[in-house]
Image (tube, rainbow, N blue to C red):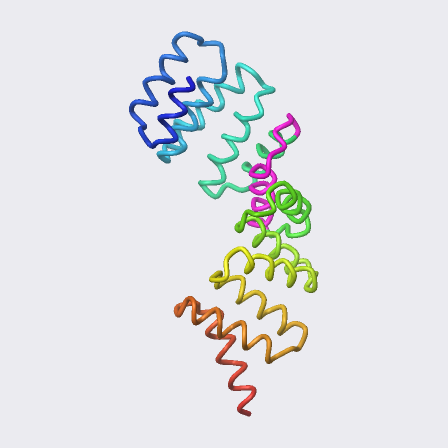
């Protein structure tokens, strides 16, 4: 089984599948083999079959947190965020308290426009993995969406410390400054976003409107 996981991580799907199949045949009542095969199917975006393998694992052991996490990923990838949310929550309740679970649960709430509900999960994900750029950025967005502009601004600045070429962080930092009526700093950040990503339409539009305002 460990060899199968190693092969899966190396992208050798067919070889990994053989090891996982052998594991299932040797231990048909052990959910782990089904979870690993489900992860393989998820990796190749065979969502229908992946769902069946994770469900089989849960049928064998309804306390299998990683099976619920896998099933949550299946629904998340298909943009069924309500079902994804339910399974990520179940994974947490069963003890899988890892940054990725909190992060994806938070994003599932965000995708349903439940920004206040997303916030504590994204905050916890950030606490568990403070150097992960994607988590930090989404946490900043959740703060901004719940009108916590001062804190959001600090978080976007922290994102830029991790990646000084993060155009979306510059754009959202610009929005924060605009919200605080600091037009010059907003323009500065919109301009930086466009320099990094010339096709950043939101930043370009914000930059254009501020320049027109200043001209007038």
Task: Kindly identify the residue that appears in the image at 64 percent across and 60 percent down.
Answer: 144
Q: Please report the bounds of the magenta region as a residue range.
A: 93-112
On the image, the x and y values in percent for residue 157 come to 60, 62
Farthest-out residue, front:
161
Q: Nearer the viewer, residue 126 or 180?
A: 126
The reply to whether the magenta stretch includes residue 46 is: no
On the image, the x and y values in percent for residue 127 come to 65, 44
Side (left or right) of 162 relative to 128: left
On the image, the x and y values in percent for residue 180 come to 68, 73
Task: Kindly identify the residue that appears in the image at 65 percent across and 77 percent down.
Answer: 182
On the image, the x and y values in percent for residue 172 come to 56, 65
Q: Quadrant of the rendered structure where residue 187 is?
A: bottom right
Q: Quadrant of the rendered structure where residue 153 is?
A: bottom right
Side (left or right) of 138 relative to 38: right
Farthest-out residue, bottom:
216
* Prevailing secondary structure of the magenta residues: helix
Side (left or right) of 96 relative to 56: right
The reply to whether the magenta stretch includes residue 104 is: yes
Q: Nearer the viewer, residue 85 or 183?
A: 183
Farthest-out residue, left:
14
Side (left or right) of 65 relative to 204: right
Task: Kindly identify the residue that appears in the image at 60 percent across and 76 percent down.
Answer: 185
């Amino acid at each position: 089984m460990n060899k199968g996981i190693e092969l899966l991580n190396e992208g050798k799907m067919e070889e990994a599948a053989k090891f996982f199949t052998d594991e299932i045949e040797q231990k048909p009542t052990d959910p782990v083999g089904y979870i690993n095969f489900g992860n393989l199917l998820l990796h190749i975006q065979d969502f229908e079959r992946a769902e069946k393998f994770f469900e089989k694992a849960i049928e064998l052991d309804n306390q299998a947190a990683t099976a619920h996490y896998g099933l949550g990923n299946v629904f998340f990838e298909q943009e069924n965020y309500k079902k994804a949310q339910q399974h990520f929550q179940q994974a947490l309740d069963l003890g899988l308290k890892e940054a990725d679970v909190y992060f994806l649960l938070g994003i599932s709430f965000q995708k349903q426009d439940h920004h206040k509900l997303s916030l504590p999960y994204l905050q916890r994900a950030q606490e568990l993995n403070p150097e992960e750029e994607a988590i930090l950025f989404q946490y900043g967005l959740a703060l901004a969406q719940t009108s916590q502009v001062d804190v959001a601004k600090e978080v976007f600045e922290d994102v830029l410390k991790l990646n000084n070429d993060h155009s979306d962080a510059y754009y959202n930092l610009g929005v924060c400054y605009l919200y605080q009526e600091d037009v010059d700093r907003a323009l500065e950040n919109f301009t930086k976003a466009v320099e990094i990503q010339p096709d950043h339409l939101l930043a370009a539009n914000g930059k254009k409107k501020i320049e027109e305002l200043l001209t007038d």
